[in-house]
Image (cartoon, grey):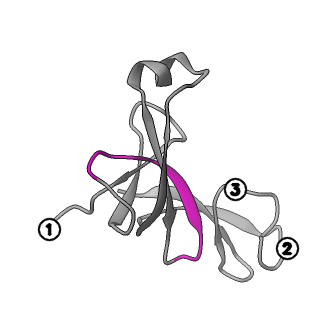
Amino acid sequence: MSIPLQFCRSCGTAQHPARDACRACLSDALEVRVTPVTGTLVSEAVIYRSLDPAMVANGPLRLGAIASPLGIRILALLAPCLSAGMAVELTPCPDRPGTIIARAPQQA
């Protein structure tokens, strides 16, 4: 699966979340590309309380920071059985637009 990421047309830098200017060269020549993203789960946290009723019903909520070879870190919901140091792939959450889920890579 793929997720939308913002890329600079001037220098090629990827960034997430989207911004008004490139974080590397400050150009405003930005475009969104739907890109497959993999990476390594660097850290994780568990949230036990939320102000969002939908999240409370599904809690506790596991979040992780994923280091991507694109040079960015992305925060994502974590699928079960993931731990720091594992390889992951990022996919959009089907029932929560704008939310990203980190899963173990699919075996081909």
Q: Amino acid at mark 3?
A: Ala
Q: Residues within 10 Å of mark 3 (few under 14, many from 20)?
A: some
Front-lying residue, 62 or 70: 62
Judging by the rendered image, the residue that carries numbered circle 3 is 18
Q: Position of residue 23 (x, y in %)?
A: 77, 71
Residue farthest to the bottom, as pictured: 11
Q: At x 55% / y 41%, what residue is drawn?
A: 98
Q: Secondary structure at mark 2?
A: loop
Judging by the rendered image, the residue that carries numbered circle 2 is 26
Q: Which residues are magenta?
A: 70-81
Give the Cα separation between the discs numbered 1 and 3: 31 Å
Q: At x 29% / y 45%, what residue is drawn?
A: 80
* Vertical comparison of 27 with 94: above or below: below
Q: Position of residue 82 (x, y in %)?
A: 31, 55
Query: Would you say residue 76 sits in the magenta stretch?
Result: yes
Judging by the rendered image, the residue that carries numbered circle 1 is 108
